[in-house]
């Protein structure tokens, strides 16, 4: 059996480019196995996750083991239930929707060419897939998302317009922008962001801008709303300070925490020798 799996794996790589993606996916299904993933202590203290059904929390962690190295998997509720919650009497589709529609939007359910997929948000920030893990063959939502999957209401009505994009929003940069806008906490000034800026954000990349937003949200936790940048301000220029190359998450040293601040010290005009003497006396 082991030899058979190895042969299928080699065959899939050999023929994927010749016969096409369909064969490749079928062979991958034969070899489909859960992966080992990390779980951090913060998972158990997440306040937004705590608002969900306990089974939804278990499901969320279970999705990590089913996702590929990019945090994507097929949106197939029955199969997901069999893999993650086989012994529980529950509606997986409802649980998935609770993860997708939560304030933090832990997952994104989307559709590409009639196929449904799930993207786990911030997956690569918390997981470190093995270098030899197979590359993802599932299209990313920011590049190819056509229709966000929503469960119809009890009367079978169509999804709301806000999650069923119009034709002009199907451009990749528009999909990227709408996704980033949905993440930002203070949604003000949406119309002040130009097409050129939206294309720039798309070029920089969803994951990089998403990381900027998360850093800013963490930095402004507890602040009054009036001191938080409008969405237009942040996505036009504010994000720059939070890019990987510019951002430093500095934590004050023990001395900085314990050392009292003397008001006006920095503004006093004194010679270097006098300043050195005063600092020596102060430190003593």
Image (cartoon, rainbow, N blue to C red):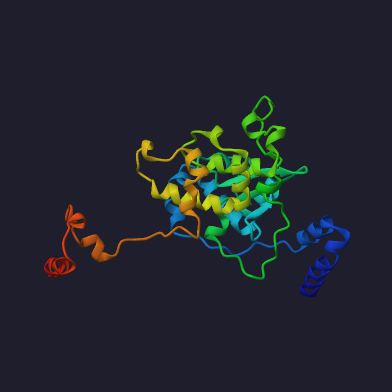
Depth check: give the residue in front, 227 or 112. 227
Quadrant position of residue 154 = top right
Query: Residue 50 vs residue 194: left or right?
Result: left
* Left or right of 22 on screen, residue 193: left
Number of marks: 0
Residue 81 is situated, as x and y percent measured from the top left of the image, at 65, 49
Query: Residue 231's x, y, as percent?
Result: 49, 39
Residue 195 in which image quadrant: top right
Q: In the rendered image of this protein, does residue 86 appear above or below residue 100?
A: below
Q: Is the N terminus in the top left, top right, bottom left or bottom right quadrant?
A: bottom right
Q: Quadrant of the C terminus?
A: bottom left
Does 75 sit left or right of 47 as displayed?
A: right
Residue at the image position 69 percent from the left and 48 percent from the top: 143
Q: Is residue 90 visible?
A: no
Whether residue 19 appears in this view of the structure is yes
Q: Position of residue 137 (x, y in %)?
A: 73, 57
């Amino acid at each position: 059996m082991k030899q058979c799996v190895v042969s299928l794996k080699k065959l899939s790589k050999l023929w994927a480019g010749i016969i096409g993606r369909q064969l490749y996916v079928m062979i991958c299904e034969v070899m489909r196995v859960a992966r080992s993933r990390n779980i951090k202590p913060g998972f158990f203290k997440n306040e937004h996750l705590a608002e969900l059904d306990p089974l939804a929390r278990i499901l969320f962690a279970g999705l990590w083991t089913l996702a590929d190295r990019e945090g994507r998997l097929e949106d197939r509720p029955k199969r997901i239930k069999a893999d993650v919650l086989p012994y529980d009497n529950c509606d997986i589709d409802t649980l998935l929707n609770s993860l997708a529609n939560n304030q933090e939007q832990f997952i994104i359910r989307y559709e590409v060419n009639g196929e449904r997929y799930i993207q786990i948000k911030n997956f690569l920030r918390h997981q470190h897939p093995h270098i030899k893990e197979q590359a993802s063959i599932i299209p990313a939502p920011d590049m190819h998302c056509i229709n966000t999957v929503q469960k119809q209401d009890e009367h079978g009505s169509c999804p709301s317009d806000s999650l069923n994009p119009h034709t002009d929003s199907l451009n990749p940069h528009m999909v990227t922008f709408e996704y980033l806008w949905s993440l930002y906490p203070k949604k003000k000034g949406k119309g002040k962001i130009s097409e050129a800026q939206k294309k720039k954000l798309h070029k920089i990349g969803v994951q990089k801008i998403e990381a900027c937003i998360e850093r800013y949200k963490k930095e402004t936790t507890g602040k009054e709303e009036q001191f938080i940048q409008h969405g237009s301000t942040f996505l036009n220029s504010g994000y720059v300070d939070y890019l990987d190359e510019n951002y430093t998450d500095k934590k004050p040293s023990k001395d900085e925490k314990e050392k009292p601040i003397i008001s006006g010290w920095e503004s006093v005009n004194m010679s270097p020798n006098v300043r050195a003497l005063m600092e020596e006396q102060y430190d003593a």
